[in-house]
Image: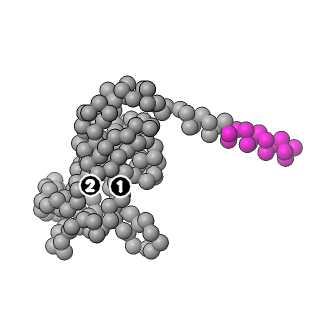
Amino acid sequence: MKKLTFFVVALFLLLAGCAQQTAGKPTTEEALDWVDDIARAWVVAHSHNWDSDAEDDGIRVWVELQDKNEDEIRYENIEMPILIEVYTTESKTLPREPERLVYSGSSVTRSWDKDAFVTGANGIRDIAWEDMSTLPTDQTYGIIYVTITLPNGKEFKALYDEARIK
């Protein structure tokens, strides 16, 4: 009886994993179909620790493409370049206004689930504190701007104005 139970559970897990891996992910051939559904880009960044000590080492940046209902667009094996810029802000009041560029870099996204915030994945870029040219007088929080270029050449921009930058 134990062997039969184990077999049924193992078979269920195997089938569930196969269904999860193939459901809802466009292939390269379907790339241009989903591009037309994109209405906006979304970005978020949080302080992150990527080594063995207890201190945060910098920020991790995530980007998503969303449709008109703000649902995430799913894609796989599609390389899209992303420009990332981080700015200090003039004051602590909202809305924050960009003051000085402290980081500019690039990255790529290839898959919605490997780069997505909701999956807890790796994001598109880790930016170390020392890679941002902040000054002691700068505010702790700044603004991140991203520009993502789609396979058809169209660009979407997004900003996150509550990013810890030091």
- Left of 154 or right of it: where is 6? right
Label 2 crowd bin: few (<14), some (14–19), many (20+), radius 10 Å:
few
Q: Residue at x 53, y 32 (%)?
A: 23
Q: Earlier in the sequence, mark 2 or mark 1?
A: 2
**Cβ atoms at labels 2 and 1 below 8 Å apart:** yes
x, y percentage for residue 44?
32, 51
Q: Secondary structure at mark 1?
A: strand
Q: Main secondary structure of the magenta part?
A: helix
Is 9 within the magenta?
A: yes
Q: Residue at x 41, y 46 (%)?
A: 116
x, y percentage for residue 53?
45, 74
- Between 148 and 151, the residue placed more toward the observer is 151
Above or below, 25 against 93 in this view is: above
Q: Secondary structure at mark 2?
A: strand
Label 1 crowd bin: few (<14), some (14–19), many (20+), radius 10 Å:
many
User: Disc 2 designates what residue?
Assistant: 105
User: Disc 1 designates what residue?
Assistant: 125
x, y percentage for residue 18?
62, 36
x, y percentage for residue 8?
77, 39
Q: Which residues are magenta?
A: 1-14
Say what amino acid the circle numbered 1 marks.
Arg
Q: Residue at x 36, y 68 (%)?
A: 57
Task: Report, in whole angstroms, how far the alpha carbon at label 2 lies from the one at label 1.
Answer: 9 Å
- Left of 119 or right of it: where is 45? left
| Residue 74 seen in this snapshot | no
